[in-house]
Amino acid sequence: MTRVSVRNEDRNVSLGEEVRVADGWWLRLRGMIGHPEPARGEGLLILPCEGVHMHWMRYPLDIVFLDEAGLVVALYHGLRPWRFSRSHKNAACAIELRKGTLAETGTEIGDRLVWSDPRRAAA
């Protein structure tokens, strides 16, 4: 599976160096279900994504939704198992991260996040 590095350009801080890319329907549906809690620097980039569910999860996650330009349009700090995010029609993707990552990095709505191009990372 492709992995990318995600960075908050506005705050000059890394959100994750080992973020897996879920860009197929099964990978997006499964998300982190059945995976151990992510370590610091790990996460999942879901492309495309307007909302997430936490069914069958055993731990909370921080979730950030981005628009096509990479701007943060919504944040969820510690979304708990068996909960849903709202649907964000202006979101192009979501990133699931270890609980506490958004607070530690100071990430806020309006920040610009960037990640390494999966095609270049795989080459």
Image (cartoon, rainbow, N blue to C red):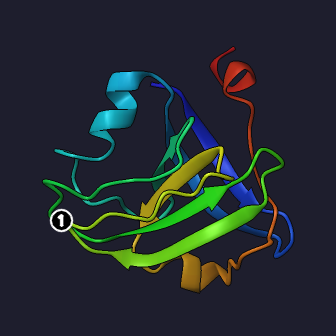
Q: Image height check: is 65 above or below 75?
A: above
Q: Nearer the viewer, residue 71 or 105?
A: 71
Q: Vertically, is 26 above or below 50?
A: above
| Picture coordinates of residue 116, whole percent (x, y) | 74, 38
Residue at position x 55%, y 51% in the image: 94
| Of the pair 109 and 120, the residue shown nearer to us | 109
Amino acid type of the residue tagged 1 in the rendering: Trp
The image quadrant where one finds the C terminus is top right
Height in image: 71 above or below 62? above
Quadrant where the image shows the N terminus: top left
Q: Residue at x 53, y 54 (%)?
A: 95
Q: Position of residue 78 (x, y in %)?
A: 37, 78
98 left or right of 36?
right
Q: Looking at the rendering, which quadrant does residue 7 occupy?
A: bottom right
Residue at image position (69%, 53%) is 90
Nearer the observer, 76 or 89: 89
Q: Nearer the viewer, residue 72 or 123?
A: 72
- Asked which secondary structure carries label 1, the reply is loop
**Residue 25 falls in which quadrant of the image?**
top left
**Mark 1 — residue?**
82
The answer to whether 105 appears left or right of 102 in the picture is right
Q: Position of residue 48 (x, y in %)?
A: 57, 36
